Amino acid sequence: MKSPSSLDELIAALRCLPGVGPRSAQRMAYHLLQRDQPGAARLGAALTRALERIRHCERCNSFAEEAVCELCRSPRRDAALLCVVESPGDLLMIEQARCYPGLYFVLMGALSPLDGVGPKEIHLDRLLKRATDGTVREAILATNFTVEGEATAHYVGELLRERGLKVSRIARGLPVGGELEHVDSGTLAQALMERREVS
Amino acid sequence: MKSPSSLDELIAALRCLPGVGPRSAQRMAYHLLQRDQPGAARLGAALTRALERIRHCERCNSFAEEAVCELCRSPRRDAALLCVVESPGDLLMIEQARCYPGLYFVLMGALSPLDGVGPKEIHLDRLLKRATDGTVREAILATNFTVEGEATAHYVGELLRERGLKVSRIARGLPVGGELEHVDSGTLAQALMERREVS
């Protein structure tokens, strides 16, 4: 017995979602058709609308509906600070921490030559142009502490320092509330090496 | 800082998927926009297409694109047997076990008075009409072995027996509290073979 082809197509299409395998996709499709058709219609419309409207901010490269996003247009942000992150999700995390007054640049990825992600794919030309526009004094590298994120921070840092900018990297150490007993040895070693003098 | 509204809407819409909370929804939305825009477009189109095309088969009540689905039209199936299941996913599981030659009726749910699911919501009028059309000799109750599934089997069984049909229940080869969707084909085949007549 064959399933209706539009049902099969929906199941296949749901697998483009991260972490969704064949069984979850089937469960999701049945759920939508059987119990939440309004939700399915809303999701279909939201996808179409987002694809139509969302583009990249000309300044920070994050997702935006306008040419320049609300954050980049804000007069309250410190234009001398530019924080470089891998993704819009990382930007959001930093914003939620409510501790950073400056602006951002979103690479939309990290260097990974084996996956075909080179300097062009992470928009380094645009970052360099943005960082040398005369307003930025310090670039804060906030890429992930993964192999790719570290390589990206190293590479981007070199380029920005060559252009006379002050470059910093967010600190690595134990998380707030972390216990020595439960942290991995790499983090602990790094926390020891990067210890700060208590005055 | 506010996210673009069409992005917020997409994140909210993704939460209609079962098992998707706020964080997963955010991760999915960023993934689609950042790394898989063709996949997002395909998913949007598949949702729209499925909602337009999929309806319920007039005979078995499962998902179909035609008035009567391929399975119900098949001359190779034994029209004397009618297997009653809760959902199209359950039907698919039994088909995959390749041990059942008859036809189906899909209730699209199970009796659950507290959730407002009564006899009307599980299409009992249509099931009774279908089961008494003169071709069906035996109705096999294959609802889940949950409280709702058992109550449904009991209720449906009474009604069908009153109308002179032979009624059987798939064997409890499944663990108590188990659901058809999560069991292996071998166990399911065993449970079908060992069905017992309800006296």
Image (cartoon, coloured by chain):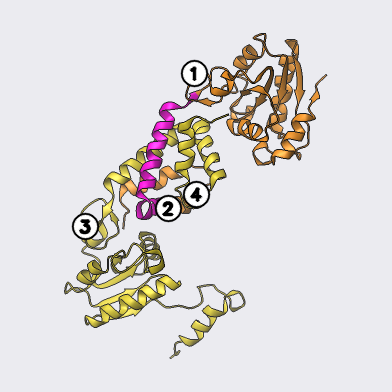
Chain colours: A yellow, B orange
Label 4 chain ID: B
Give, as a three-letter code, the residue at label 4.
Answer: Gly
- Seen at 51% across and 86% down, the residue is A192
Same subunit, tags 4 and 1: yes
- Measured in 3D between alpha carbons, the distance from the residue under mark 4 to the one under mark 3, in whole angstroms, is 30 Å
Q: Is residue B88 magenta?
A: no
Residue at the extreme left of the image, as rendered:
A134
Alpha carbon of mark 4 to alpha carbon of mark 1: how far? 36 Å
Where does label 1 land, which residue? B67
Q: Which residue is mark 3?
A: A68
Q: Circle 2: is it few (<14), some (14-19), or many (20+) Cα within 10 Å?
A: some
Which residue has dot 2 on it? Answer: B26
Camera-near label (4 vs 1) is 1
* Element on which disc 3 rests: loop
Q: In the drawing, what numbered circle is on residue B21?
A: 4
Instruction: Indicate the position of residue B77 as horizontal and vertical percent values.
Output: 65, 21
Q: Is residue B134 left or right of residue B7?
A: right
In magenta segment, residue B54: yes
Chain containing the residue with disc 1:
B
Q: Which residues are magenta?
A: B26-55
Q: Left of B127 or right of it: where is B1?
A: left
Q: Is residue B132 above or below residue B90?
A: above
Dominant secondary structure of the residues highlighted in magenta in the image = helix
